[in-house]
Image: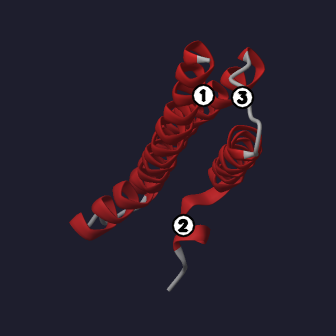
Amino acid sequence: MSTIWEQVGFIRYPLTLTFLVVVILAVWSAVKLFRPGATPDLRSKAWVDAILFWGGFAVITGVVGTLVGIIIAAQFIEAAEAISTSMVWGGIKVALLSSTIGVLILAFAALLWFALQLRWRFLMAETAEA
């Protein structure tokens, strides 16, 4: 039995890259926004917004993986002499894994973006009050 990592196929590398970029951007932004004396500059806001972009890019990457996976599954089904429903649904299941992972990365990125955006806005409010 192969692991999900193996089943996702080649698209696992771009999905992994997008996940790592989201994590790195979130850590970088958190360090900038939660350090003592942090200020709400526009560069920090740009880094926070980049988290959401890369989350969205993960979904796009996942959809591309799903489309390619369905095409590959269709080729195998077309070449097979006998077709079973488990073969068809097994191929579709594997093809849908990349979209699922992309959506999960987006959900994770959106939560991080919201938390960091909230911190940035609180810093803006503190600066405006001062």
Please tell me which of labels 1 and 3 falls first in the chain. Answer: 3
Query: Which residue carries the number 2 mark?
Result: 7
Residue that appears at 73% across and 44% down: 21
Residue 46 falls in image quadrant: top right
Q: Residue 39's x, y, as percent? A: 73, 27
Query: Looking at the image, which is closer to me, 110 or 34?
Result: 34
- Do tag 1 and tag 3 residues touch (Cβ < 8 Å)? no
Kindly report the distance in space between the C-alpha atoms of the residues bearing marks 1 and 3: 15 Å
Q: Quick one: quadrant of the C terminus?
A: top right
Is disc 2 surrounded by few (<14), some (14 to 19) or many (20+) residues within 10 Å?
A: some
Residue that appears at 55% across and 35% down: 119
Q: Secondary structure at mark 2?
A: helix
Query: Which residue carries the number 3 mark?
Result: 47
Kindly report the distance in space between the C-alpha atoms of the residues bearing marks 1 and 2: 44 Å
Residue that appears at 66% across and 28% down: 50
Q: Residue 94's x, y, as percent? A: 43, 60
Q: Secondary structure at mark 1?
A: helix
Query: Looking at the image, which is closer to me, 45 or 89?
Result: 45
Please tell me which of labels 2 and 3 falls first in the chain. Answer: 2
**Type of residue at label 2?**
Gln
**Type of residue at label 1?**
Leu
Of the residues tagged 1 and 2, which is closer to the observer?
1
**Type of residue at label 3?**
Trp
Query: Looking at the image, which is closer to me, 74 or 116?
Result: 116
